[in-house]
Amino acid sequence: MNRMAAPRSVLDLVIRTLLATLWFACAFFLLIPASLLWLAGADLVPPPGATRWVGALLIAGAHLALVFPIAAFVQRGRGTHAPFDPPRRIVLGGLYRCVRNPMYLLYVVIMLGEAVLYRSLLLLVYAGAFWGLAHAYVVGHEEKALRRRFGAGYDAYCRRVGRWLPRLRGGR
Protein backbone atom coordinates (compact mmCIF):
# COMPACT_ATOMS: atom_id res chain seq x y z
CA MET A 1 0.00 0.00 0.00
CA ASN A 2 1.22 3.51 -0.78
CA ARG A 3 2.50 5.14 2.41
CA MET A 4 0.71 8.40 1.59
CA ALA A 5 -2.56 6.45 1.12
CA ALA A 6 -2.33 4.39 4.32
CA PRO A 7 -4.68 5.59 7.04
CA ARG A 8 -3.08 7.21 10.07
CA SER A 9 -4.52 7.06 13.55
CA VAL A 10 -4.40 10.14 15.74
CA LEU A 11 -2.23 8.25 18.24
CA ASP A 12 0.24 7.34 15.47
CA LEU A 13 0.40 10.97 14.37
CA VAL A 14 0.86 12.22 17.93
CA ILE A 15 3.70 9.76 18.58
CA ARG A 16 5.41 10.65 15.28
CA THR A 17 4.98 14.36 16.04
CA LEU A 18 6.40 14.03 19.55
CA LEU A 19 9.41 12.09 18.26
CA ALA A 20 10.05 14.63 15.49
CA THR A 21 9.70 17.51 17.95
CA LEU A 22 12.01 15.88 20.47
CA TRP A 23 14.65 15.14 17.83
CA PHE A 24 14.48 18.63 16.34
CA ALA A 25 14.53 20.40 19.72
CA CYS A 26 17.43 18.33 21.03
CA ALA A 27 19.50 18.87 17.91
CA PHE A 28 18.78 22.51 17.06
CA PHE A 29 17.92 24.07 20.43
CA LEU A 30 20.18 22.09 22.77
CA LEU A 31 23.04 20.17 21.13
CA ILE A 32 24.15 22.69 18.51
CA PRO A 33 23.86 25.81 20.72
CA ALA A 34 25.60 24.05 23.64
CA SER A 35 28.36 22.85 21.31
CA LEU A 36 28.85 26.34 19.92
CA LEU A 37 29.01 27.85 23.41
CA TRP A 38 31.42 25.13 24.56
CA LEU A 39 33.67 25.58 21.52
CA ALA A 40 33.72 29.33 22.16
CA GLY A 41 34.71 28.68 25.78
CA ALA A 42 31.50 30.24 27.11
CA ASP A 43 29.78 29.15 30.27
CA LEU A 44 26.74 26.91 29.74
CA VAL A 45 24.95 28.66 32.60
CA PRO A 46 23.29 31.86 31.36
CA PRO A 47 24.62 35.06 32.93
CA PRO A 48 22.37 36.78 35.48
CA GLY A 49 20.41 39.89 34.64
CA ALA A 50 17.54 41.09 32.50
CA THR A 51 18.74 39.30 29.37
CA ARG A 52 18.18 35.99 31.15
CA TRP A 53 14.49 36.83 31.59
CA VAL A 54 14.03 38.32 28.13
CA GLY A 55 15.69 35.32 26.50
CA ALA A 56 13.69 32.87 28.60
CA LEU A 57 10.43 34.66 27.72
CA LEU A 58 11.25 34.55 23.99
CA ILE A 59 12.09 30.85 24.19
CA ALA A 60 9.04 29.92 26.27
CA GLY A 61 6.66 32.07 24.19
CA ALA A 62 7.88 30.63 20.90
CA HIS A 63 7.64 27.07 22.23
CA LEU A 64 4.09 27.75 23.41
CA ALA A 65 3.16 29.27 20.02
CA LEU A 66 4.66 26.23 18.24
CA VAL A 67 1.96 24.02 19.73
CA PHE A 68 -0.64 25.56 17.40
CA PRO A 69 0.93 24.99 13.95
CA ILE A 70 2.20 21.56 14.99
CA ALA A 71 -1.28 20.59 16.20
CA ALA A 72 -2.77 21.92 12.94
CA PHE A 73 -0.45 19.63 10.98
CA VAL A 74 -1.73 16.65 12.98
CA GLN A 75 -5.42 17.60 13.11
CA ARG A 76 -6.01 19.25 9.73
CA GLY A 77 -3.09 18.06 7.66
CA ARG A 78 -2.99 14.50 8.96
CA GLY A 79 0.80 14.55 9.10
CA THR A 80 3.75 15.87 11.08
CA HIS A 81 6.21 18.72 10.73
CA ALA A 82 9.04 16.32 9.90
CA PRO A 83 10.07 16.68 6.23
CA PHE A 84 9.98 12.88 5.79
CA ASP A 85 6.41 12.64 7.20
CA PRO A 86 4.55 15.71 5.87
CA PRO A 87 0.86 16.57 6.09
CA ARG A 88 -1.37 14.98 3.48
CA ARG A 89 -3.72 17.93 3.31
CA ILE A 90 -2.78 21.56 2.94
CA VAL A 91 -3.04 23.50 6.21
CA LEU A 92 -4.33 27.05 5.69
CA GLY A 93 -5.78 28.01 9.07
CA GLY A 94 -4.42 29.31 12.35
CA LEU A 95 -0.98 30.90 12.08
CA TYR A 96 -0.85 29.74 8.45
CA ARG A 97 -3.41 32.45 7.63
CA CYS A 98 -0.76 35.04 8.54
CA VAL A 99 2.46 33.57 7.12
CA ARG A 100 3.28 30.44 5.17
CA ASN A 101 6.16 29.36 7.42
CA PRO A 102 5.27 30.10 11.04
CA MET A 103 7.20 27.12 12.42
CA TYR A 104 10.50 28.21 10.87
CA LEU A 105 9.91 31.73 12.19
CA LEU A 106 9.24 30.41 15.68
CA TYR A 107 12.37 28.24 15.49
CA VAL A 108 14.38 31.38 14.74
CA VAL A 109 12.71 33.21 17.66
CA ILE A 110 13.79 30.35 19.95
CA MET A 111 17.35 30.66 18.64
CA LEU A 112 17.27 34.44 19.06
CA GLY A 113 16.02 33.89 22.61
CA GLU A 114 19.02 31.65 23.25
CA ALA A 115 21.33 34.33 21.88
CA VAL A 116 19.78 36.89 24.24
CA LEU A 117 19.74 34.43 27.16
CA TYR A 118 23.47 33.77 26.81
CA ARG A 119 24.39 37.22 25.46
CA SER A 120 26.06 35.36 22.62
CA LEU A 121 26.99 36.84 19.26
CA LEU A 122 27.86 33.32 18.10
CA LEU A 123 24.30 32.11 18.83
CA LEU A 124 22.96 35.17 17.01
CA VAL A 125 25.04 34.17 13.97
CA TYR A 126 23.72 30.61 14.35
CA ALA A 127 20.12 31.91 14.30
CA GLY A 128 20.89 33.92 11.15
CA ALA A 129 22.53 30.93 9.49
CA PHE A 130 19.57 28.72 10.39
CA TRP A 131 17.14 31.24 8.90
CA GLY A 132 19.27 31.48 5.73
CA LEU A 133 19.32 27.70 5.35
CA ALA A 134 15.59 27.46 6.09
CA HIS A 135 14.92 30.10 3.42
CA ALA A 136 17.04 28.23 0.88
CA TYR A 137 15.24 24.97 1.73
CA VAL A 138 11.78 26.54 1.55
CA VAL A 139 12.42 28.27 -1.78
CA GLY A 140 14.57 25.55 -3.35
CA HIS A 141 12.66 22.46 -2.30
CA GLU A 142 9.63 22.78 -0.06
CA GLU A 143 7.56 25.22 -2.12
CA LYS A 144 8.16 23.21 -5.30
CA ALA A 145 7.07 20.01 -3.55
CA LEU A 146 3.95 21.71 -2.17
CA ARG A 147 3.07 23.02 -5.64
CA ARG A 148 3.34 19.50 -7.07
CA ARG A 149 1.27 18.04 -4.25
CA PHE A 150 -1.44 20.68 -3.81
CA GLY A 151 -1.49 22.44 -7.21
CA ALA A 152 -3.65 25.51 -7.80
CA GLY A 153 -4.82 25.61 -4.18
CA TYR A 154 -1.26 26.15 -3.02
CA ASP A 155 -0.61 28.76 -5.72
CA ALA A 156 -3.69 30.73 -4.61
CA TYR A 157 -2.54 30.47 -0.99
CA CYS A 158 0.91 31.83 -1.95
CA ARG A 159 -0.72 34.83 -3.63
CA ARG A 160 -2.70 35.60 -0.45
CA VAL A 161 -0.16 34.87 2.27
CA GLY A 162 3.45 36.02 2.60
CA ARG A 163 6.29 33.55 2.96
CA TRP A 164 7.89 35.20 6.02
CA LEU A 165 5.93 38.40 6.68
CA PRO A 166 2.17 38.94 6.85
CA ARG A 167 0.74 40.83 3.91
CA LEU A 168 -1.20 43.94 4.75
CA ARG A 169 -4.71 43.99 3.35
CA GLY A 170 -6.34 47.31 2.54
CA GLY A 171 -9.48 48.15 4.50
CA ARG A 172 -8.90 45.55 7.28
Image (cartoon, rainbow, N blue to C red):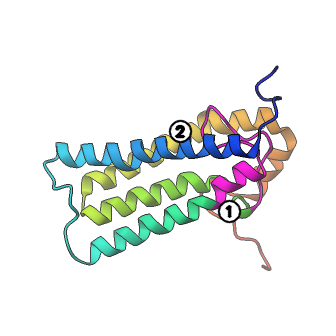
Secondary structure beneath disc 2?
helix
Q: Earlier in the sequence, mark 1 or mark 2?
A: 1
Q: Is residue 90 magenta?
A: yes
User: With respect to residue 7, does 3 lie above or below?
Assistant: above
Q: Is residue 81 visible?
A: no
Q: Main secondary structure of the magenta part?
A: loop
Q: Is residue 32 visible?
A: yes
The spot of residue 31 in percent (x, y) is 33, 43
The residue range painted magenta reads 68-93
Residue reaching furthest to the left: 41
The spot of residue 171 in percent (x, y) is 80, 80
What's the amino acid at mark 1? Leu
Q: Residue at x 74, y 46 (%)?
A: 10
Question: Horizontally, is 108 left or right of 47 in the view?
Answer: right
Report the residue marked by disc 2: 136
What's the amino acid at mark 2? Ala
